[in-house]
Image (cartoon, rainbow, N blue to C red):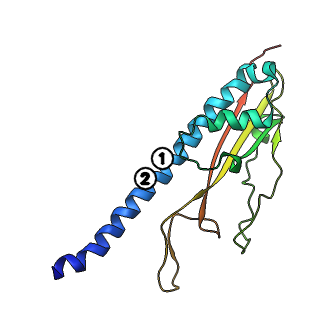
Amino acid sequence: MIEFALLALPFFAIMTAILETSLVFMSGQILESAVQDASRMIRTGRAQQRKDTLASFRSNVCDRLYGLFSDCSGLHVRVSVVSNFQSATVEPPVDWTCKTDNCGWTRDENYAPGAGSNVVLVQVYYKYPVLLNLNFLGGGSFGLSNLNDGRRLLGAVTVFRNEPFT
């Protein structure tokens, strides 16, 4: 019984860390896949034909997240036309130096899907809640959070040229 007491805490801590790491990376992959699938509607011109809005694009992404993201209104979406592939710069819309727990997005959302043959940059970000965020006696944290409020910024980005639709 003493051996179990000594080994139980490290064992369950390691198992919890493995499960949470798996969940965070799986959520990131599902976000990436959802953004790729939703962006296909823009690339083929179907979103422009249906006159989709930012809300409908967000809903399209959210429908493909399988319930892993608790608040789809927390998705930060930026869809913009860029002049060419080289000018597509990606910069997460967070202030990494912010020291408070309620830091907002640093850039506004945007939805401009462009016309046929335009190069489009799609960025979707989400502040994913992390359950296990350990701080060992003030000597630094051990966990997956990279934001000051204990969440992890997940992002999915794609750049493509729209098909030459009319």
Q: Position of residue 99 (x, y in %)?
A: 72, 75
User: Which residue lies under the disc numbered 2?
Assistant: 22
> Distance of mark 1 from mark 2, alpha carbons?
6 Å
Q: Amino acid at mark 1?
A: Met
Q: Residue furthest top?
A: 166
- Image quadrant occupied by the N terminus: bottom left
Residue occupying image coordinates x 78% and y 30%: 119
**Would residue 30 appear left or right of 38 to someone viewing this image?**
left
Q: Amino acid at mark 2?
A: Ser
- Image quadrant occupied by the C terminus: top right
The residue nearer to you, when weighing 161 against 139, is 139
Q: Position of residue 85 (x, y in %)?
A: 75, 35
**Would residue 106 appear left or right of 156 to someone viewing this image?**
right
- Circle 2 Cα neighbour tier, 10 Å, few/some/many (<14 / 14–19 / ≥20): few
User: Which residue lies under the disc numbered 1?
Assistant: 26
Residue occupying image coordinates x 72% and y 74%: 100
Q: Secondary structure at mark 2?
A: helix
Residue occupying image coordinates x 79% and y 14%: 165
Q: Position of residue 142 (x, y in %)?
A: 48, 72
- Circle 1 Cα neighbour tier, 10 Å, few/some/many (<14 / 14–19 / ≥20): few
Residue occupying image coordinates x 33% and y 62%: 15
Contact between labelled residues 2 and 1, with CB atoms less than 8 Å apart: yes
**Would residue 50 appear left or right of 152 to someone viewing this image?**
right
Relative vertical location of residue 23 with respect to residue 63 in this rendering, above or below = below
Q: Position of residue 18 (x, y in %)?
A: 38, 59
Relative vertical location of residue 127 with respect to residue 65 in this rendering, above or below = below
